[in-house]
Image: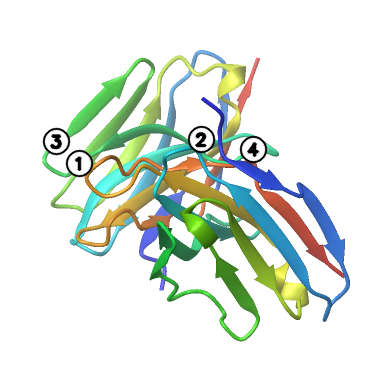
Amino acid sequence: EAGVAQSPRYKIIEKRQSVAFWCNPISGHATLYWYQQILGQGPKLLIQFQNNGVVDDSQLPKDRFSAERLKGVDSTLKIQPAKLEDSAVYLCASSLGPGRGYEQYFGPGTRLTVT
Amino acid sequence: QQQVKQSPQSLIVQKGGISIINCAYENTAFDYFPWYQQFPGKGPALLIAIRPDVSEKKEGRFTISFNKSAKQFSLHIMDSQPGDSATYFCAARYTGTASKLTFGTGTRLQVTL
């Protein structure tokens, strides 16, 4: 079974530029999560999708971050404009979903450096 | 507000020794407590998990001890091996919010020869 795929793996941008990350969850997984992991900290949930609907985006900085999950499969996370404090690893995870399984499987992450 | 506190921040253990990582939580609504293992350049992977109606769970060399009254839980790694060197995160899930996880700050474990 293929795992959660993410791209790119690394990205370096200047502040005020925009960037987008892509995630392909495990096939059949209804729930998709985006986490931000700052160096030396645990992952922090940014947004959670159930199929193509948003379940929780309470910690998403909506003035600069946006995410979508069209057709309930792949998802993109965008930052525009980026700030220095956005430097982090962005992790995507997926799970089967309510009634089927809550275990989250994580992708390798995208390491973003904002200079 | 940090709802899951983890200690120590780093840990060095000799091969064959016992590694112990502790976590404390505040919110009694948490109903699921997993531990994740993360190697450099990789995403976290579920290691072992426990529910609050159980005081201990063991899987191979990994054991979770859970103290509901103290709102604490810990990970014990018996016979620690160099391959166990990684960062370990405890986490907790809220009741009624599907699978939203709140993570601790992580413990960087190094197992020396």
- From the top left corner, tell me how far across and down residue B107 is, in percent: 53, 44
* Front tag of 1 and 4: 4
Res B101 quadrant in image: bottom left
The answer to whether residue A40 of the structure is visible from this angle is: yes
Query: Which numbered circle lies on residue B42?
Result: 4
* Measured Cα–Cα span from mark 2 to mark 4: 10 Å
Q: Do the residues labelled 1 and 4 touch (CB within 8 Å)?
A: no
Mark closer to the chain start, 1 or 4: 4
Q: Are marks 3 and 4 on the same chain?
A: yes
Nearest to the observer: residue B24 or residue A58: A58
Residue annotated with mark 2:
B37
Q: Are marks 2 and 4 in contact (CB under 8 Å)?
A: no
- On-image quarter of the N terminus of chain B: bottom left
Q: Do the residues labelled 2 and 1 touch (CB within 8 Å)?
A: no
Q: Kindly identify the amino acid type of the residue bearing the numbered disc 1.
A: Arg
Q: Callout 3: helix, strand or loop?
A: loop
- On-image quarter of the C terminus of chain B: top right
Q: Mark 3: few, some, or many residues within 10 Å (few <14, many ≥20)?
A: few
Residue annotated with mark 1:
B51
Is residue A4 found left or right of B4 in the rendered image? right
* Measured Cα–Cα span from mark 3 to mark 4: 30 Å
Q: Callout 2: helix, strand or loop?
A: strand
Name the residue at 51% across, 35% down.
B37
Mark closer to the chain start, 3 or 4: 4
Residue annotated with mark 3:
B54
Mark closer to the chain start, 2 or 4: 2
Q: Do the residues labelled 3 and 1 touch (CB within 8 Å)?
A: yes
